[in-house]
Amino acid sequence: MQLQTNVMPKSLLVPHAPVGEEARVDAVLAAIEKHIGFIPDGVRLFSFSPPLLDSFVTNVSYFNSGARLAPSLMAMIRYLVSWEAQCHFCINMNEGFLTNMGVSLDAVRAARKNPELAPIPEKEKPLLMLALKSVNDPAGVAKKDIELAKAQGWTDRDVFDVVAQAASNRAFNLILRTFKVESQGAFM
């Protein structure tokens, strides 16, 4: 009898800061660790390019700020975009973020099959649906999709931001999947 083991593939690259920029990268990663308690391997991958690391962290900070849109909405967008892209790292990370916000894991997972069931306020659902449509069928996005969001009081900026969050997350999913960063611990 042969035993099967589920070994996650190791990353194709092991991140490191460019020579002379180690302190810059270390400072960014230390700030992330201080803020959330650890350094996600997906973020660590950006160590190769300090300007892209800075840009990525600034982008994530904006979307997670809650200044305009609820962090739970943004996490749900990332979660469902990641689910569709089958980026296990981001699926697990955003499940963790959502459950830490007090959202039921069963409710989060139910949204995989039907995003209309996402555990967010009804007012936010047109934004969620627009964000998902924007990465799955951008040519199919129509004025009515935007009007549905605006009917709930959302602004042009809010509409733009959710689409930008979905697109940004899809790009992140592709980077992680390309370099086989499928779970935390990919660089061990």
Image (cartoon, rainbow, N blue to C red):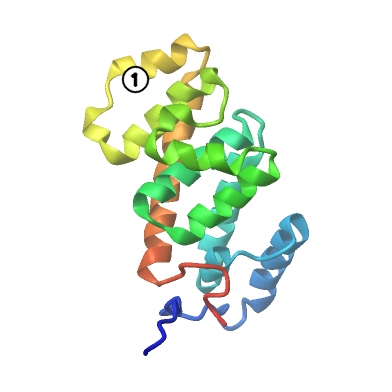
| Residue depicted at x 69% and y 46% | 100
Q: Position of residue 103 (x, y in %)?
A: 64, 37
Q: How many marks?
A: 1
- Callout 1: 10 Å neighbours few (<14), some, many (20+)? some
Q: In this rendered view, identify the residue nearer to me: 5 or 187.
A: 5
Tell me the quarter of the image containing the C terminus. bottom right
Tell me the quarter of the image containing the N terminus. bottom left
Q: Is residue 63 left or right of residue 32?
A: left
| Residue depicted at x 52% and y 70% | 45
Q: Position of residue 123 (x, y in %)?
A: 53, 17
Q: In this rendered view, identify the residue nearer to me: 123 or 68.
A: 123
Q: Position of residue 47 (x, y in %)?
A: 56, 71
Vertical side of 185 occupied by 28: above or below: above
Q: Which element carries disc 1, helix, strand or loop?
A: helix
The single residue placed furthest to the bottom in the displayed view is 1
Q: In this rendered view, identify the residue nearer to me: 35 or 20.
A: 35
The single residue placed furthest to the front in the displayed view is 1
Residue 66 quadrant = top right
| Residue depicted at x 53% and y 12% | 153
Q: Is residue 169 left or right of residue 32?
A: left
Residue 177 quadrant = bottom left
Q: Which amino acid, by three-letter code, is at mark 1? A: Asp
Q: Position of residue 80 (x, y in %)?
A: 44, 43
The single residue placed furthest to the top in the displayed view is 151
Residue pointed to by mark 1: 145
The single residue placed furthest to the left in the displayed view is 139
| Residue depicted at x 58% and y 43% | 105
Vertical side of 132 occupied by 183: above or below: below
